[in-house]
Image: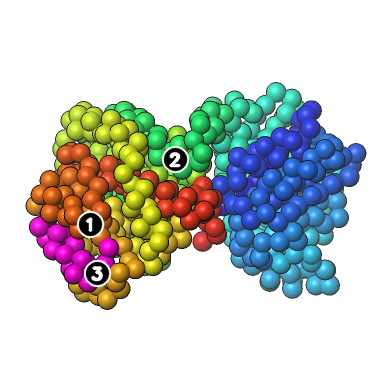
């Protein structure tokens, strides 16, 4: 959340920064701004709204060093004034993170200063202006020493033709070009711009000029950070003929499953080693990643008969969890940067647990703290709502659960093998539109299922509410009669997922209970008797017969399409839902 980018080299900085900001817009899209250094003078433009609002100013922003920001508001409403960069004296800064002690810093060091914004970030630039002693790295280090919270900072100074960068908690990547260098929050921003990148450690300060990059640790000692290939490709950012990234990424579900499955073979032994002697497993994550953990809990308990819990990371880290050296914690995160998930993983490590990271982001903070990294090979996911990464997470978690139960990766891959084709067929379904129309008109939509179908119900509900804003909840089907039934009337839609033949009868009773209260019902099923039973009374979407444990790969894709189509009917932008941003790096 919040995207930052900086460029220093021989080209027009503003254009490069503008392009990078458009690519980073999924990290925040309430306002954006750019500062460039031109003849030892800083010029800034910032506007409420999307990055495109800056397009008309680029021609006037000359200079080959600059910084930019796309904002997801934390402190201060979205407005021109609160947009970054923030300036003071000869400095301009962009910030991703939260400065928790900003009011204390204001009263301690900045009394009498007038502030132009309501942000926590403006304090940083004011402090830098106050404490600058002619040496940028040491002045920045001094300011950073006063900050409590998280930050990725890029700074330009009228006296220095380059960029200073500082990091704690929030992600920052340095990009190495030829006679030019970059800084960005995330790899996609640098796709096609530079081949090599380095990831900064917490506490690091970097100085970028066109000629090179110098990195210092928090004691201002020069350090070397590993230079790695930039895996992001410009093609990852193309829409490939799709009107939205969400649809493009749903169509990439088959490839995500296939690649994740192949990649697992390389980590199978490390997973085996990490799980040896484990007597309890906790799967933790947020949002969609947590929902994939709900399915994983069922996999682990059913296959390996080892107690497993899915825990929301933001709860786990504050509840004094019971964790021993025989506990495995599986931390699931698309971005690998979600603050709650990374902190939960770090807490688990400190308590002696083995930590396995399941992530789509190879250089993320989560990968750097975990004992073992199981890659989700979904490729860049640009749409704020997770789709293909969820399918990749389910694939990886299924394979981990089977490893724990003693099955080989090859035997798991054999079971997964039919699913890329099944999911490719699902992506082309045209019979979801009618249900999308029902949901778009509904007063509330409920998703219900049992066991793994319940895990999918939770994810279906999250997807629908976040991209269409239709109020929605997911429930275990058995819970309907314990409260939720009070909500059911002719204006509501209840979507049942029924893929377990052994549970079909019980779930069908719940469908009957909804229909008897005049509620509208839909059934997503591969149980023939269920489809037959409800074909004239409910909206039935039949999915192909498949392995019951892996049916979430297909049923969740139907629900992803349902959310997408409902959003379009309601004229929402499915790629950039209101108030949301991808990669939640603050608490
Ligand atoms: C929902 C969604 C969010 C994320 C959550 C965790 O579609 O995308 O709920 O799943 O913010 O993000 P990661 O997986 O990056 O930790």
Residue ranking furthest to the front: 536
Where disc 1 sits, the SS reads loop
Q: Quadrant of residue 187?
A: top right
Depicted 431 relative to depicted 128: above or below: above
Q: Residue at x 20, y 29 (%)?
A: 414
Classify residue 395 by image quadrant. Answer: top left
Q: Position of residue 456 (x, y in %)?
A: 28, 52
What residue is drawn where x is 79% and y is 32%? 12
Look at discs 2 and 1 and give the one toward the viewer.
1
On the question of residue 325 being in view, the answer is no
- Please name the residue that numbered disc 3 is placed on: 518
Q: Residues within 10 Å of mark 2 (few under 14, many from 20)?
A: many
Using the numbered discs, state the Cα–Cα distance from disc 2 to disc 1 in whole angstroms. Answer: 26 Å
Q: Which residue is mark 1?
A: 538
Indicate whether residue 482 is drawn in magenta. Answer: no
Q: Main secondary structure of the magenta part?
A: helix
For residue 247, the mark is 2
10 Å crowding of disc 3: few (<14), some (14-19), many (20+): some
Q: Nearer the viewer, residue 193 or 280?
A: 193
User: Farthest residue toward the top?
Assistant: 178
Identify the image quadrant of residue 286.
bottom left
> Which residue range is magenta in the image?
503-520
Residue 370 rendering spot, x and y as whole percentages: 40, 44
Q: Which residue is depicted at the point 70% across and 32% down?
A: 181
Q: Residue 510: within the magenta?
A: yes
Side of 215 relative to 395 (left or right): right
Dot 1 alpha-carbon crowd within 10 angstroms: few under 14, some 14 to 19, many 20 or more: some
Q: How is the image coloured?
A: rainbow
| Local SS, label 2 | helix
Q: What residue is at 67 percent from the left and 57 percent from the top?
A: 145
Q: Are marks 1 and 3 in contact (CB under 8 Å)?
A: no
Image spot of residue 579 (x, y percent) = 55, 59
């Amino acid at each position: 959340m919040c995207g930052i980018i900086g460029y220093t080299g021989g080209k027009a900085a503003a254009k490069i920064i503008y392009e990078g900001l458009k690519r980073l817009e999924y990290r925040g899209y309430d306002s954006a701004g750019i500062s460039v250094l031109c003849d030892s003078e800083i010029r800034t433009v910032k506007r409420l709204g999307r990055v495109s609002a800056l397009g008309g100013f680029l021609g006037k922003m000359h200079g080959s060093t600059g910084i930019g920001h796309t904002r997801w508001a934390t402190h201060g409403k979205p407005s021109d004034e609160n947009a970054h960069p923030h300036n003071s004296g000869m400095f301009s800064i962009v910030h991703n993170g939260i400065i928790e002690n900003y009011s204390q810093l204001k009263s301690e060091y900045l009394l009498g200063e007038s502030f132009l914004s309501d942000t926590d970030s403006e304090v940083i630039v004011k402090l830098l202006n106050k404490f600058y002693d002619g040496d940028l790295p040491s002045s920045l280090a001094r300011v950073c020493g006063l900050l409590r919270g998280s930050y990725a900072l890029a700074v330009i100074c009228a006296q220095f033709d380059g960029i200073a960068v500082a990091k704690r908690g929030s992600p920052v990547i340095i990009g190495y070009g030829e006679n030019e260098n970059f800084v960005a929050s995330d790899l996609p921003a640098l796709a096609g711009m530079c081949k090599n990148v380095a990831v900064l450690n917490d506490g690091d300060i970097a100085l970028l000029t066109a000629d090179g990059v110098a990195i210092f640790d928090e004691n201002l000692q020069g350090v070397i950070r590993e230079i790695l290939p930039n895996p992001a490709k410009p093609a990852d950012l193309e829409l490939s003929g799709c009107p939205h990234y969400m649809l493009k990424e749903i169509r990439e579900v088959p490839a995500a499953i296939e690649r994740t499955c192949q990649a697992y073979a390389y980590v199978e032994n490390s997973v085996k080693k990490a799980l040896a002697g484990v007597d309890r497993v906790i799967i933790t994550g947020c949002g969609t990643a947590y929902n994939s953990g709900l399915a994983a809990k069922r996999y682990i308990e059913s296959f390996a008969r080892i107690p497993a819990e899915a825990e929301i990371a933001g709860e786990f880290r504050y509840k004094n969890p019971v964790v021993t050296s025989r506990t495995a914690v599986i931390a699931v995160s698309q971005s690998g940067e979600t603050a709650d998930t990374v902190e939960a993983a770090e807490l688990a490590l400190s308590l002696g647990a083995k930590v396995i990271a399941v992530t789509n982001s190879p250089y993320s903070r989560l990968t750097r703290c975990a004992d073992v990294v199981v890659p989700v090979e979904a490729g860049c996911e640009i749409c704020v709502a997770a789709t293909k990464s969820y399918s990749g997470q389910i694939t990886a978690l299924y394979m981990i659960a089977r490893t724990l139960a003693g099955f080989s990766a090859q035997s798991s891959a054999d079971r997964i093998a039919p699913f890329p084709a099944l999911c490719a067929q699902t992506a082309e379904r045209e019979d979801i539109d009618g249900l999308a129309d029902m949901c778009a008109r509904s007063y509330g939509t409920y998703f219900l299922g049992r066991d793994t179908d319940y895990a999918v119900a939770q994810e279906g509900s999250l997807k629908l509410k976040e991209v269409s804003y239709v109020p929605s909840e997911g429930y275990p089907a058995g819970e309907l009669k314990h409260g939720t039934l009070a909500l059911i009337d002719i204006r509501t839609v209840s979507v049942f997922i029924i893929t377990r033949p052994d549970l079909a009868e019980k779930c069908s009773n719940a469908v009957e209970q909804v229909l008897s209260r005049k509620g509208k019902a839909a059934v997503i099923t591969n149980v023939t008797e269920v489809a037959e039973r409800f074909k004239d009374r409910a909206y039935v979407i039949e999915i192909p017969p498949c392995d019951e444990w892996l049916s979430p790969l297909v049923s969740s894709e139907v629900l992803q399409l349902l959310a997408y189509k409902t959003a379009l009917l309601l004229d929402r932008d499915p790629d950039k839902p209101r108030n949301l941003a991808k990669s939640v790096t603050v608490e």
